Image: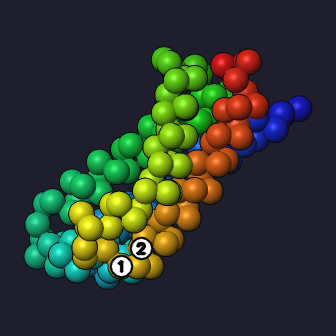
Amino acid sequence: MSTFGTQALLLGGLLSVAAAMAHLACIALGAPAYRLMGAGEKMARAAEAGKLRPTLVTLAVTAILLTWAAYALAGAGIIGPLPFTRPALAAICAVYLGRAVAFPLLKPAFPDNSQTFWLVSSSTCLVIGVVHAFGLISQWPVL
């Protein structure tokens, strides 16, 4: 029988995978998807122009999200153990939660991103971060 912590980390991992897939959809669908996701007109125009930068940035974010998903799944016992699972999950929680609350400080660095982008992405990070945190705290003695 799964514990609450196991279920929370499984959900957190699946949410990270979903976020990664949303990023891959931007690459597959191109500029309209970048616009829909609120990534900014500069990024959308670069994708339209066939520039490599949007794809590389999006692939980097995707790789990070998939790595984080793997750590959540390892913490849940779904996949084999990964090195430094406990501190990695703590760092992942900190980044998700930090990103959720720091968006007012980040907005000036990314002026092309829409208000919708900031609200949706920050809310998403908050939910995923809280789910990870519940899982980590519940699984702490096990990890």
Residue neighbourhood size for the residue with mark 1, other residues' Cα within 10 Å, grouped as few (<14), some (14–19), many (≥20)? some
The spot of residue 72 in percent (x, y) is 59, 36
Considering the image in quadrants, where does the N terminus appear?
A: top right
Q: Residue sitting at 66 percent across and 19 percent down?
A: 143
Residue 111 vs 88, above or below: the answer is below
Q: Are marks 2 and 1 in contact (CB under 8 Å)?
A: yes
In space, the residues marked 2 and 1 are separated at their CA atoms by 5 Å
Q: Amino acid at mark 2?
A: Phe
Crowd class of label 2 (few under 14; some 14 to 19; many from 20; radius 10 Å): some
Q: What residue would you read off at disc 1?
A: 114
Considering depth in this image, is 6 or 108 the residue closer to the camera? 108
Amino acid carrying label 1: it is Ser
Is residue 127 visible in the rendered structure shown here?
yes
Q: Is residue 81 shown left or right of residue 119?
A: right
Q: Residue at x 38, y 43 (%)?
A: 64
Q: Quadrant of residue 104?
A: bottom left
Q: Is residue 12 above or below residue 21?
A: above
Which residue bears the numbered disc 2? 117
Q: Which one is nearer the viewer's eye here, 107 or 127?
A: 107
Q: Please, which residue is most extreme toward the front here?
A: 105
Give the label on residue 50, or none.
none
**For this view, does 56 lie left or right of residue 117?**
left
